[in-house]
Image (cartoon, coloured by chain):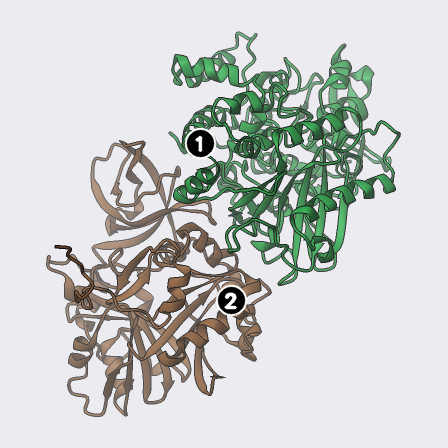
Amino acid sequence: MKRYDAIVIGAGHNGLTNAAYLAKAGLDVLVVEKNDYIGGAAVSRELHEGWVYSSCSYVCSMMRQSLHRDLDLSRHGLMLVPYLGTVNFDDHGNTLVSYHGEAAAYNELKRHSRHDADAMFRLQADLGRYAQVIRKTLLRTPPDPTSFRIRDIQELLFLAKQFGALGQKELYEYIRFFTLSAADFLDDYFETDIVKATMASAGIIGTALGVYSPGSSYILLHHVMGDIDGSIGAWGLARGGMGAISNALASACKSYGGEIRTNAGVDQIIVKGGRAVGVALSSGEEISANIVVSNLDARRTFTKIMDRDDLPPGIFEKAENFKIRGSSGKVNIALSGLPKFTNVPDNPYANRGGQAFTGSMETMERAYDCWKRGTWSDDPFIESVIPSAWDPTVAPPGQHWMSNFIQYCPAELADGPWTPEKRDQFGQTVVNKIERYSPGFKDLIVHMEVRTPFEIEQEVGLTEGNIFQGELTIDQLLFNRPFPGYAQYRMPVKNMYMCGSSTHPGGGVSSACGANAAREILMDLRRPNTVPEDDCYDD
Amino acid sequence: MIVTMTNADFSTEKPRPSHFQPRLDERNIHDAWSSWNGYKLAEYYFEAEYEYFCIRNTCGTYDICPMQKYLISGPDAEKMLNRMVTRDVTKMRNNRVSYVLWCTDEGRLIDDGTIFRLADDSFLLTCGSPSTAWLKKSSLGFDNVTINDRSDELAALSLQGPTSCAVLKRMGLKGIEQAKPFTIHHFDFFGDSLMVSRTGFTGGLGYELWIKAELALELWDAVYEAGADYGIHPFGEQATNMARLEAGFIMPGYEFNEALKTVHFEHDQTPFELNLDWMVDFKKPHFNGRAALLEESRRGPRYTLTKLDIEGNKPAEGAFIYDSQDCSRHIGYVTSGMWSPVVKANIALAMIETPYLKGELWAEINYEKELRHYSKIARCSVKEEPFWAPDYAKVTPPRDY
């Protein structure tokens, strides 16, 4: 029977990246995927005739450019198009448009507050400085701070140098920043609620934290440290949907000889003598390999597809306690026309890109309170994008699809399990809120796909539907991700690795986790390192 | 005394309005204007990169009214053009377009342009710079040819991008999807004739629309109405320059200095230096510059325009090229360079001394970070193919974006 050099479990974008690099290095690689389509949470499918939904992730900013370039993903069909002009809506009908041009952005802020318009320059500089340091760590393996190996010491020195270059005052600020709440962080800059709420919303997306929870300021940074072609903080759409990223990675992987099998869910990672030796599929088929790489989250990997007895003591418990809480839902809507929003300038740049129904700091916190009580938010924070206003390939001409990301939506409800009726009620809550800002919106709806954490876990496999494969708090970042002592992609069982967002640098469609894991695997195999360094714009 | 300028006459100073000017004014929200051949021309309308992405992702229009357009007709028209340009015009069939170059007797490039063969004895020559004087010189000895400068009477709009064919279909141009690259088609438009050629300067799918100036606004409105659901947006000079560089097309003022405007010896270029060997046809009868070009083809060009993929992401605009990392010998210079958002590569065109092309190439790139200036040495690799050449650009009928 055929024995592969490596099997990667899960054809999400990190799994495909990992497989592409292993195949590029000459390894015989197989990717196994439980669904009959690839992509994991970076997926696009025609769920209603003529409309292509990106059911989970919907925008892209963190994709590592050097990987895109090195794997020649453009030739494999990937085009990332920046989109501009998100409008923030508050509870009182006021709007704040995020303009791209400096003059327009300044004038718009000044409409709300002269003070905040000035302060925005300082915020952008500070965030830019923080982002600059953290960006340099993305395509590097975190050092083990307890190790005396030369490589770990070198990497620790590299980190120290990066942070040290900030200067003493900024270093203090940075350390403080990691533990602050988004609200506390922003209070130092702004006095107007709509400006604070606009900036704070990035601090809660995907996480089970509120704008007043310690640690949410880092989430904010995580959302603004990406870039599109050097424009830091910019977000883009993948032409054809987020699935275009996975498809391009799959095409690159295959061009190097990698194989991908769908409808091949893994029941068990087979371990013999303390070594991973292959996988058992749910069909009963067993496939052997010298290396097994899991792209599943840490909880799922260790508690669902591994035998507890194959693990060293404590690992199972660590996985059970890994913070991976479902907090968000997704409502994808096919529309017969472009919705119009109230109090937004009627021009082609402002009234079409994205909408953030932020409400206020208070409203967002109240939405979080609902989550804590085990109900979905009755007045949720919604981040919407209308990709079809930019991408001609995802909806029929003149018609549109709108992606709505919702905070908060719990994985488990206080009044019992999710049912299709509750799911639809949740969807209706979202539609009702949008209708408030866009009268007539409901009449445009052609088709809807409502996804709670339950559906996301069932379909994609993310535990509790957590989009980051685990919370991005300091206890689970850098050398703590997924667990202290296991941050270098090697897992406690020999020849087994992890390559998903549960590893450094965490969630987001960056391909960095998969690439970093490939680098470590090639190092263990004593093969040349063919995974590129990051291309930093500020060097 | 209050001095006002109300009655001052600036009519010569101010660039002339384009035939599309009322529509361009509405769209150029940042008043970012430059000029081309005395006409007002947009640098950009909203933002260069935004417009660039319209070219690559949806579609956009570029005002090519300022381009020079000469109707050359008569029994000797073909002979005259054939002696002027380096390609064989006699091979052109009617309703076909051909990219052409013309040179001095010394084989130095005067300009590039396109010839539209409208009939056996009728051609439209378009080019970037005014060429009346050179055309007159070139027609010496040909008695039966008339040259009619139509630059001011003909409005032209370039429609480029993957959705461009869909826009023209919605506009009602029946059968436009069957138009092959470099062909010309005519459609009824407001009782007049709209000429459409499948041509462009962006390397993607695209068309150019030609109409008499009086119908310019009607054409604009029809195109924009049809394009509303296809992401149509006007684009300016900056986005054009990005797209043409990705396609590997040369631009006067960047890759070549027009020979008739060149002061310093051999600071102009030859077709061979510009890597346009395929454009020079020695099999046809005598043409301007033939002897000099034949000689150059034997000994090889001194410089060769080369497509470079440069490591890192600092655009190499204006960079020097060296033969080694320690910059021991200066062997060329970058003519155009940019980070390409769709290719995801740091691309450049560079003039490099031909003998050194086989060795290592290093670019010394200067850049600035918060007012402090830096330079870095980056390895370059030579690309044979255009940086951006999607197969959909050549397919007929074009597939749905």
Residue, disc 2: B164
Dot 1: within a 10 Å radius of its alpha carbon, few (fewer than 14), some, or many (20 or more) residues? some
x then y, percent, for residue A360: 61, 33
In which quadrant is the N terminus of chain A drawn?
top right
* Mark 2 or 1, closer to the camera: 1
Q: Depth check: A203 or A515 in front?
A: A203
Same subunit, labels 2 and 1: the answer reads: no
- Helix, strand or loop under label 1: helix
- The amino acid beneath tag 1 is Met
Q: Which mark is residue A120?
A: 1
Q: Depth check: A433 or B178 in front?
A: A433
x then y, percent, for residue B287: 22, 77
**A479 over B78 or under it: above or below:** above
Chain A as rendered: colour = green
Res. B197 in view: no
x then y, percent, for residue A189: 47, 25
Chain B as rendered: colour = brown
Q: Depth check: A292 or A13 in front?
A: A13
Residue drawn at (27%, 64%) of the image: B36
Q: Depth check: A478 or A386 in front?
A: A386
x then y, percent, for residue A228: 48, 41
Q: Chain of mark 1?
A: A
- The amino acid beneath tag 2 is Ser
**A469 over B254 or under it: above or below:** above
Position of residue B74 in the picture relative to residue A495 (left or right): left
Q: Which mark is residue A464?
A: none
- Helix, strand or loop under label 2: helix
Residue drawn at (41%, 51%) of the image: B47
Res A420 quadrant in image:
top right
Count of picture labels: 2
Dot 2: within a 10 Å radius of its alpha carbon, few (fewer than 14), some, or many (20 or more) residues? many
Res. B69 in view: yes
